[in-house]
Amino acid sequence: MNQRTLASELVRAHMGELDKLRDMLEKIQRSLGEILAVQLELQDRFEEEQERIYGLKAELHEVRADQDDELSFGVLLEMAVNKLKL
């Protein structure tokens, strides 16, 4: 194989590798777009839930600033269910 043919084959092979790399980058970009869309949706839901909780807290006049022994949501839910059973 002469030098010109070798150089031509190297360029062709390198272009093929660049095409593969471009395809991978496009797939990554699409995936990142999908991830971003899900992240934004979850962020919106989180903010809505946060607003609801603050609203409920205000309605219940829960303005206790220094509560050291906060109970978890699960424990409080279990307590509420037990009260409803009575």
Image: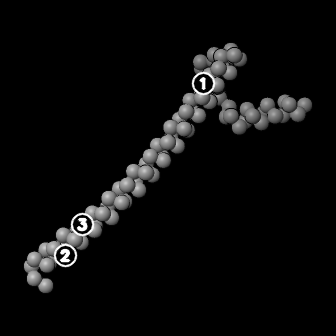
Q: CA distance from mark 2 to mark 1?
A: 63 Å
Residue on which disc 1 sits = 51
Q: Earlier in the sequence, mark 2 or mark 3?
A: 2
Percent position (x, y) of residue 58? Answer: 65, 16
Which element is circle 1 on? helix
Q: Is residue 26 left or right of residue 6?
A: right
Q: Residue at x 65, y 29 (%)?
A: 70
| Residue type, label 1 | Glu
Q: Is residue 31 left or right of residue 58?
A: left
Q: CA distance from mark 2 to mark 3?
A: 10 Å
Residue on which disc 3 sits = 15
Percent position (x, y) of residue 52? Answer: 64, 25
Q: Residue at x 27, y 63 (%)?
A: 18
Which element is circle 3 on? helix
Q: Quadrant of residue 51?
A: top right
Quadrant where the C terminus lies?
A: top right
Mark 2 Cα-neighbour bin, 10 Å: few <14, some 14–19, many ≥20: few
| Residue type, label 2 | Glu
Residue on which disc 2 sits = 9
Residue 45 to residue 30: above or below: above
Residue at the far right in the pictured view: 86
Percent position (x, y) of residue 8? Answer: 16, 73
Q: Is residue 81 left or right of residue 55?
A: right
| Residue type, label 3 | Met
Q: Earlier in the sequence, mark 2 or mark 1?
A: 2
Q: Nearer the viewer, residue 62 or 1?
A: 1
Percent position (x, y) of residue 84? Answer: 86, 31
Labels in figure, total: 3
Q: Closer to the observer: label 3 or label 1?
A: 3
Q: Quadrant of residue 63?
A: top right
